[in-house]
Amino acid sequence: MTPVDDTKPPSPFSPKLVLGIAIIALGLILTLDNLNLVEAHTILKLWPLVLVVMGFAKIRQEGSEGGMGGWLLVLGGSFLLLVTFARGHLADAIGPMLVVALGILIVVKALKQNRRVPPELAQSEDFLRGTAIFGAFKRRMFSHAFKGGELTAIFGGYEVDLRQAMLESGQARIDVFILFGGGEIRVPEGWEIANRATAMFGGLSDATHHGPPSHAGERPRLVITGLILFGGTEVKS
């Protein structure tokens, strides 16, 4: 009997797929325009949306912290949409918005270089990865060999539930980066939390339920490292 392959197949959502669909749509729009059913020049003003969707497809393929090219496509497409449709004060805001976006791209790239997570570890189901930029995410881990993780929140937040997880070798590390955001990490009762994160105009709160002092050395140990700026993280049981 041939063993079942449990590996996750690659996602069909790719930049090439998006481009192909866009070309098909272009042909249909031009055909309908020739039949005087639609006005192509109005619809084609939305063409930068193709760049935005291609960018998100590339980010999905390469990971939220690795797809720098994807973020550039999203940024470029968004800029062209703003130039096309912005009026009045919105047009004046384009420059500062691009500066913010560029800064976020640089921060995300720097985080990837500083963390240096091995590719095999980053792809492991026992390793937690999550990024929230102007948004939020939730993660629940059921791993019996949890190897740690990395969490990023920039103008966003996260909720992580580790109450069903078990630490590999009794210890793991989660690296956090928070900028104008926040998060919550839930752990099983009895876990020891070691706060090694640096906080400026923010903080990390340990609200876990500790076991008896005599068993402190035997408890699973979760080390929190990283940088918290104008935000915070709370660890709860």
Image: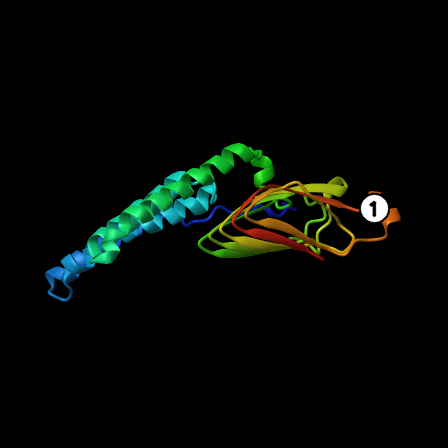
Q: Is residue 81 left or right of residue 137?
A: left
The residue tagged 1 is: 216
Quadrant of the frame with the C terminus: bottom right
**Observer-nearest of 205 and 201:** 201
Give the residue at x 82% y 53%: 211
Give the residue at x 45% y 47%: 60
Q: How many callouts does the rendering have?
A: 1
x and y percent of residue 94 in the render? 27, 50
x and y percent of residue 32 in the render? 16, 62
Q: Is residue 118 left or right of residue 79?
A: right
Would residue 31 be visible to someone looking at this image? no
Q: Secondary structure at mark 1?
A: helix
Give the residue at x 14% y 62%: 39
x and y percent of residue 171 in the render? 73, 41
**Observer-nearest of 32 and 217:** 217
Q: Colour scheme used in the picture? A: rainbow
Kindly give the residue lying farthest to the bottom in the view shown. 37
Query: Based on the displayed image, in which of its 4 quarters is residue 175 positioned?
Result: top right
Q: Amino acid at mark 1?
A: Ala
Would residue 213 be visible to someone looking at this image? yes
Kindly give the residue lying farthest to the right in the view shown. 214
Q: Is residue 91 left or right of residue 196?
A: left
**Observer-nearest of 22 and 108:** 108
x and y percent of residue 80 in the render? 24, 49
**Observer-nearest of 144 and 171:** 171
Kindly give the residue lying farthest to the front in the view shown. 201
Q: Quick one: label 1, few (<14), some, or many (20+) residues within 10 Å?
A: some
Q: Is residue 164 above or below residue 147?
A: below
Q: Is residue 91 left or right of residue 170?
A: left
